[in-house]
Amino acid sequence: MRTFRRLAVYCGAAGATVPRYGELARAVGTELALKGIGVVYGGGSVGLMGALADGALEAGGEVIGVIPERLDKLELGHRGITDLQVVPDMHSRKARMAELADGFVALPGGYGTWEELFEVTTWTQLGYHRKPVGVLNARGYYDHLLAQIQHGVDEGFVQEAVSHIICASTELGELLEMMATVELPLTEKWISNP
């Protein structure tokens, strides 16, 4: 069973107009901090990102933000977190977040959140890391995305051997348990035996 020192949490910088998602992000930050799990995130002070960081900080947790220079210059960087790391670009941000984290959790978000989710999932699939990936499917936000993954399996674009890489639950506690125990595929096995 895996333990998590830090988890990278992907979520929207938007979402301020949907209070229930902001409340969710704050609650996730709080719960991770109370479990002694540090938060690694995109470094923003707005939207779900800001709520996540604030929730973790208020509960005494460690919060490491990684933000590209361009976004930091727009004054979006959260100055009250444990450690704000400013990097040159988005590629550097994603690599640094992956380096700092023991696993990855996606909360509701848009293109950026989805892209980050699928990039780390692909890295797991190809064996670039052996870190679990999870989706907090609160309020059914990811129902359609999870159905699309199953459609990919059904149509032969996602192999059954790697179809379970993304753990999904509506409850954070259950999701963390799933991520702690998921059997990640051995790259050589699924590539050589399609």
Image: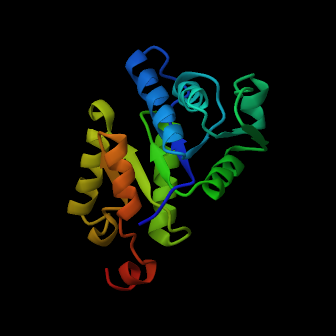
Foreground residue among 173 and 166: 173
Q: x, y (%) of residue 183?
A: 36, 70
x 50%, y 38%: residue: 34
Which of the image's four quarters has the C terminus?
A: bottom left
From the viewer's perspective, is residue 192 above or below residue 173? below
Foreground residue among 186 and 169: 169
Foreground residue among 158 and 123: 123
x 40%, y 60%: residue: 180
Q: Quadrant of residue 46?
A: top right
Residue 10 in sight in this render: no
Q: x, y (%) of residue 15?
A: 47, 21
Q: Is residue 33 left or right of residue 158?
A: right
From the viewer's perspective, is residue 97 above or below residue 20? below
Which of the image's four quarters has the N terminus?
A: bottom left
Q: x, y (%) of residue 140?
A: 27, 34
Q: How is the structure coloured here?
A: rainbow
Q: Quadrant of residue 69?
A: top right
From the viewer's perspective, is residue 10 above or below residue 92? above
Q: x, y (%) of residue 103?
A: 51, 55
The residue at the far bottom in this view is: 192
Q: Is residue 71 left or right of residue 7?
A: right
x 39%, y 57%: residue: 179
